[in-house]
Amino acid sequence: MTAARIRIAPSVLNADFGRLTEEVLALEAAGADAIHWDVMDGRFVPNLTIGPDVIASVRPHTSLPFEAHLMVDEPAGSLHRWVEAGCALVTVHAEACTHLHRTLGAIADLDARVGVALNPGTPPQAVSQVLGLLDHVLVMTVNPGYGGQRYLAEMEAKTSHLRRELDRSDRTIRLEVDGGISAETIMRARGAGARSFVAGSAIIRHPDGYTAGIAELRQAAGEGTSAPEDVAAA
């Protein structure tokens, strides 16, 4: 059986926000599979980034899927804003939702793909009771809030646990990792079971440009070897 292609979703957190559309177009040309928008509210995490109007302004200029990673407290009241901005996938943090099941159901009601993210200190069992609602699980391999952090290898055990649990599910649920992904760490994350990778600095700050950065990640991940998961959907 032909192996599935891994999915690379560059984060634009460290891109040039003064020319954000051009940055996204450059990432598309470089071979990105999606654009990962790190949305931070200055409360759930100490950083403050962008709102839905910024994402909406870029949406008409690219065909790449957009994923909104909401690092915000109690995101339920604003979910529609991210879908209206053009995000096919909306991911909320389990730790940020008082009523996680209800919040995930609200994303599904908006006809968006449903994602949940787990901070490093959150056990994998936090998603066990909501698997029937999920399309996407995101394991944070850094503490969220800033780009350029060191990859936390101890999160590989959590990723492996989730890989086994997701494989037993009757749904196709993508497993993604985010934080410290580079040519030095991506194979470890893939070996733990991830097939989708958020990468920021390894692409945005690559000395030879975005195309080289994405190609280097694919090569380092051993793309073309066994990877029994479909990662094509947004």
Image (cartoon, rainbow, N blue to C red):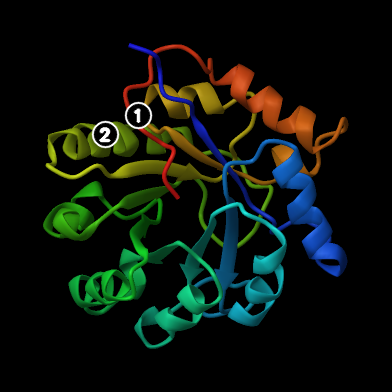
Say whether marks 2 and 1 touch (CB < 8 Å). yes
Could you tell me if residue 199 is visible in this image? yes
Which residue is at a point 51% across and 55% down the rendered structure image? 143
Which residue is at a point 84% across and 35% down the rendered structure image? 209
Disc 1, SS: loop
Q: Mark 2 Cα within 10 Å, few/some/many (few <14, many 20+)?
A: some
Reading the image, the residue beneath label 1 is: 193
Q: Quadrant of residue 173?
A: top left
Tell me: residue 15, above or below residue 222: below
Tell me: residue 163, above or below residue 198: above
Taking depth in this image into account, of 57 and 207 the one nearest to the observer is 57
Tell me: residue 83, above or below residue 138: below
Disc 2, SS: helix
Residue 158, x across and y down, in percent: 30, 39
Q: Quadrant of residue 76?
A: bottom left
Badge 1 amino acid = Gly
Which residue is at a point 15% across and 52% down the rendered structure image? 128
The numbered mark, 2 or 1, whose residue comes first in the sequence reads 2
Could you tell me if residue 48 is visible in this image? no
Q: Mark 1 Cα within 10 Å, few/some/many (few <14, many 20+)?
A: many
Reading the image, the residue beneath label 2 is: 163
Residue 140, x across and y down, in percent: 45, 49
In the rendered structure, the answer to whether residue 217 lies left or right of residue 122 reads right
In the rendered structure, the answer to whether residue 45 lies left or right of residue 4 reads right
The N terminus, quarter of image? top left
